[in-house]
Amino acid sequence: GSVRMCRRKPPRGPTLTMVGVDVSLALVAPDKFRGTVTATEASEAMARGASSSGWAVHQRPLADGGEGFLDVLEAVSTGRGTAEVTGPLGRPVRAGWIRVGNLAIVEMAQASGLALVGGATGNDAVAASSRGTGELIVAAARALSDAAPKPHGRAAEATGTETGGWGSTPTVVVGLGG
């Protein structure tokens, strides 16, 4: 079949009066579309579509804490770093963090994510380790070494391990001199 595009007035909804003209508002806040577009790319495409139909658009790309998490936070970042860490199957991988003030934020998916173990179908969660996530946290904390290591958060979603990130804990304790 064919697809037919119709131009219609935006549906009724919240409006903002700007210089005496009512403008319909749209909030576009997508996560990534895995394997196709990032959250930012999806947000930009949705915003273009909505604004071409007369909507005022607010873009807020989101992430669930898995892959793409750092990309969404890039707008508030005050710096980036990377480190070579142990991947979930023992091979070296490159993973990164961003800095926001005195806080380093890591993306667990870059060090221990499903994509690194063959995806959901090729994953052997028992054989996999989240040690690399611990190494990444240590590297990020050391990068902030001008001050004492700060408490850290870890975005953990869809890891390639069965430990839920606990495999990273011994690395963090040893790596920070604990």
Image (tube, grey):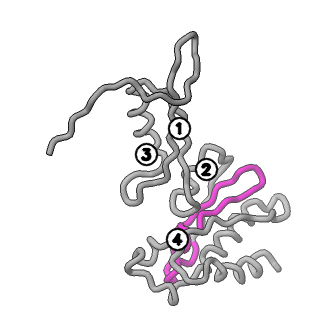
Q: Which of marks 4 and 2 is nearer the N terminus?
A: 2
Spatial CA span between label 3 and label 2: 15 Å
Q: Earlier in the sequence, mark 3 or mark 1?
A: 1
Spatial CA span between label 2 and label 1: 18 Å
* Residue position for label 1: 27
What is the three-letter code of the residue carrying label 4? Answer: Ala
The disc at residue 42 is 3
What is the three-letter code of the residue carrying label 1? Answer: Leu
Asked whether, in this view, residue 163 is left or right of residue 138, the answer is: left
Helix, strand, or loop for circle 3? Answer: helix
Q: Is residue 89 magenta?
A: yes
> Residue at the spot x=49%, y=83% of the render?
89
Q: Which of marks 3 and 2 is nearer the N terminus?
A: 3
Q: Earlier in the sequence, mark 2 or mark 1?
A: 1
Q: Where is residue 109 in the image (x, y as percent from the top left)?
A: 54, 68
* Residue position for label 2: 73
* In contact (CB < 8 Å): disc 3 and disc 2: no
Helix, strand, or loop for circle 4? Answer: loop
> Residue at the spot x=79%, y=65% of the render?
151
Q: What stretch is highlighted in magenta?
A: 85-112
Spatial CA span between label 3 and label 1: 13 Å
Helix, strand, or loop for circle 1? Answer: strand
> Residue at the spot x=45%, y=86% of the render?
124
The residue closer to the viewer here, 69 or 9, is: 9
Question: In the rendered view, would you say 29 is above or below 95?
Answer: above
> Residue at the spot x=40%, y=51% of the render?
37
